[in-house]
Image: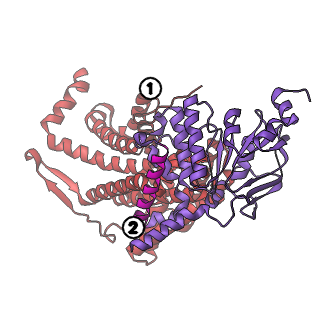
Chain colours: A red, B purple
Amino acid sequence: MLSEIFVEPFVDMVSAPDFLMQVLWEGLVSGILYALIALGFVLIYRSSRIFNFAQGIMVVFAALTLVGLHEAGVPAWVSVALTLGVMFVLAFVVERVVLRPLVGQPDIILFMATIGITLFLIGFGEIIFGGENKVMITEQLGIPTDSVVFEPFGGLLILEQKDIAAAAIAALLVIGLLLFLNKTRMGRAIRALGDDPQAAMSVGISLQTIWVLVWFIAGIIALVTGIAWGARAGVSFALEVIAYKALPVLMLGGLESISGAIVGGLMIGMLEKLFEIYWGQPLLGGNTETWFAFMLALVVLLFRPQGLFGERIIERV
Amino acid sequence: MNVHVQEDLSQHTSRADDGIAKGADLLKVENISLSFGGVKAITDISFDIKKGEIRAIIGPNGAGKTSMLNVINGFYFPQQGTITFRGEERRRARASETARDGIARTFQNIALFKGMSTLDNIMTGRITLQKRNLLWHALWKGPAEREEIEHREAVERIIDFLEIEHIRKTPVGRLPYGLQKRVELGRALAAEPALLLLDEPMAGMNLEEKADMSRFILDVNQQYGTTIALIEHDMGVVMDLSDRVVVLDYGKKIGDGTPDEVRNNPDVIDAYLGVPH
């Protein structure tokens, strides 16, 4: 028994390195998507202390809008532009109708409000786009669907081109976002508002403008996530469930940290895949991916309550 | 091209020159009353701030001084009374809007962006001086970059002025209290305000830091002609710095005048020495 847990999995890994690489790659790709969703959470949390429960449904809503528009005969790239427009309108309406009247309320009220947004978007999405599954317009967007084959160590490693594309787009998005937050005036305004809302307003930063902007950026992230995930698994409301995977990512990475969200996402993606293949399937009958991330987060929280990268909370009395 | 940029810059820096003559009313508050539920914070207070002066607001704890500043910069909306800034009466202007109109401030309990460097903190002070609106900048960075450089230069001048070159890149959360106060002043100055509100700029400082801060306040007032309203508890400092003093007690105005007049006002003496009401 001990050998099955502590020895054999590692022997398997070393004896078939090409398979190990395949497993890690698969894990990395899901990890990228977890990280993207977590990024949406972090952005909104940092600028407004709101835990945005609706990030998952925004992914679904963005993907459905994109596919729906294309089905209605709009060319693919025009659909992308229009979907971005829809996400902007959504951000604007959320700020006007939901957030603005609740300014100054306790965080938990705003959190509840985002659950309200989630339920609204589920219902609204089903009325407009129907409840059935849809296929992401991968090829129409020019995303390659072949696969690339490598032969490391004389073995076989197959990488889907759309996964590579997803990884590349996600990397660009993250780099762009980091540059935006750290190098531009707008980015400074967003960070300032998260640090000290009162001081931010006193230098002329408008709460309302920034909120619309961060929700719009979260919408852009949602669209990218929706395209990438939709290309692998189709577009349906079940996609929303993957958003819950972002929760353990946030617990690991901390709610405040962008790099935490990325590293946490990739880590969880890869670790859960490794665990599933080398421990879960032989020992536990498989399907461990549904709970592994949460267990991992729980263990980490026992030792580091602020997460792996979260800012240490020091209360001055 | 360069000439054009120069013009833009002079346009920025001219915000304090608004055609109001030195010594004329810059801000006027009339019959302001503010209450929270049943608690009256301010009752029927009127006073003015004249362009170019240093105006002190003093009074015992709980007198309504900070509430008054919060009314002036738009954090609170008074239930009664009017505020006239630069000859225009203002109705329910939010803090981000008054900042745009040229009112900058510091806070009693330092409100800096703790995760950012000194430089970035002071840069945020210039947000209102940018010509294009925030969303526009988010969408197209090109022209924004040129402006960024101009603003960076202005911020470096402020850093030199406040003698904080050595902490330019330090996250402000790590700085000692006295320096944080200085960075906060820098952020307010970066906005090139027409009216600068300072809420206890010297609270918790030692003698040497107080002397430095006094010097900065006087220099700002004299070199840039910035009008300053400040709340301060150190009477020595108040009497030395300010041109005129308004005294509040229990939310009411009990004195107004030059430091000498106020010092000899029997009501003020009573308020500070605690005579039974």
- The front one of B269 and A265 is B269
Mark 1 Cα-neighbour bin, 10 Å: few <14, some 14–19, many ≥20:
few
Q: What is the chain letter for disc 1? A: A
Main SS class of the magenta portion in the image: helix
Name the image quarter holding the N terminus of chain B.
bottom left
- What x and y, as percent, mark residue A89? 55, 66
Q: Which residue is painted at 67% across and 46% down in the image?
A: A104
Q: Which label belongs to residue B142? A: 2
CA separation in Å, label 1 and label 2: 47 Å
Instruction: For residue B132, say whether it is visible.
Output: no
- What x and y, as percent, mark residue B11? 53, 68
Which stretch is magenta?
B140-162
- What x and y, as percent, mark residue A114? 59, 50
Instruction: For residue A15, say whether it is visible.
Output: yes
Q: Is residue A302 left or right of residue A271?
A: right
- The front one of A74 and B208 is B208
Q: Which residue is painted at 63% across and 42% down in the image?
A: B107
Amino acid, disc 2: Gly
**As drawn, which residue projects farthest toward the right?**
B277
Residue B32 lies in the magenta stretch: no
Labels 1 and 2 positioned on one and the same chain: no
Element class at badge 1: helix
Q: Is residue B273 left or right of residue A251?
A: right
Q: Which residue is painted at 59% across and 57% down in the image?
A: A206
Element class at badge 2: helix
Q: Is residue B161 left or right of residue B91?
A: left
Please give the residue where the numbered disc 1 appears in the rendered image: A302
Whether tag 1 and tag 2 are in contact, CB under 8 A, the answer is: no
Asked where in the image residue B259 lies, by quadrant, the reply is top right
